[in-house]
Image (tube, rainbow, N blue to C red):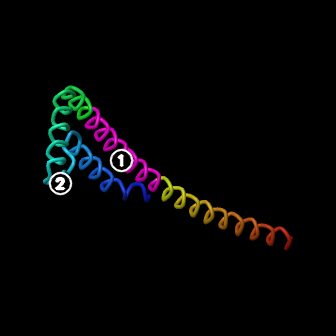
Amino acid sequence: MAASSDGPARIEALFRARAGIGAAPPAPPTLRGRAGALGVAAVRRAVFWLLLQLDRFHGAVIEAFEDQQQATEDLNGAVGKALEEFVRRERETRDRLAAVEAEVERLRRIAGER
């Protein structure tokens, strides 16, 4: 169940990572920093089509992760219910077995008296 409780935090991390795709890295306010920023901007313009594809892919990954998270939670709930039902039926079976054993013992005593 640990994975289930980690899910929302992981989804949030995916959204934060998605928001950072294509963002310029921090640059110091120096000539070298400004030159680097211009270089990054030029590269971003040159691969704009790739950034759009990455964004779509990242969105699909997030959606698939959310679907998987929901499926895992649904499965955990179903397994929990099945376990509760199993325990209930096991208890009923033990109670019935105890009643049958008591009846068998009673009949043995009656048969022994004759």
**Residue, disc 2:** 28
Residue 71 rendering spot, x and y as whole percentages: 37, 44
Q: Main secondary structure of the magenta part?
A: helix
Q: Indicate left or right for 95 with 61 as reference.
A: right
Residue 4 horizontal/vertical position (percent): 39, 55
User: What kind of element bears circle 2?
Assistant: loop
Number of on-image labels: 2
Q: From the viewer's perspective, is residue 58 above or below residue 20?
A: above
Mark 2 nearby-residue class (10 Å; few <14, some 14–19, many ≥20): few
Residue 63 versus residue 49: which sits nearer the camera? Answer: 49
Residue 105, image x and y in percent? Answer: 76, 69
Residue for badge 1: 69
Between the C-alphas of marks 2 and 1, the distance is 40 Å
Q: Would you say 73 lies left or right of 79 here? A: left
Q: Quadrant of residue 91?
A: bottom right
Three-letter code, disc 2: Pro
Q: In the rendered image of this protein, does residue 61 appear above or below residue 31?
A: above
Q: Quadrant of residue 52?
A: top left
- In this view, the residue in front, 6 or 114, is 6
In the rendered image, the vertical position of residue 38 relative to residue 9, given as above or below: above
Q: Is residue 44 magenta?
A: no
Amino acid type at image mark 1: Gln
Q: Which residues are magenta?
A: 57-81
Nearest to the eye among marks 2 and 1: give it: 2
Please say whether residue 69 is one of the residues in the magenta stretch.
yes
Q: Quadrant of residue 2?
A: bottom left
Residue in view at x 37 percent, y 43 percent: 68
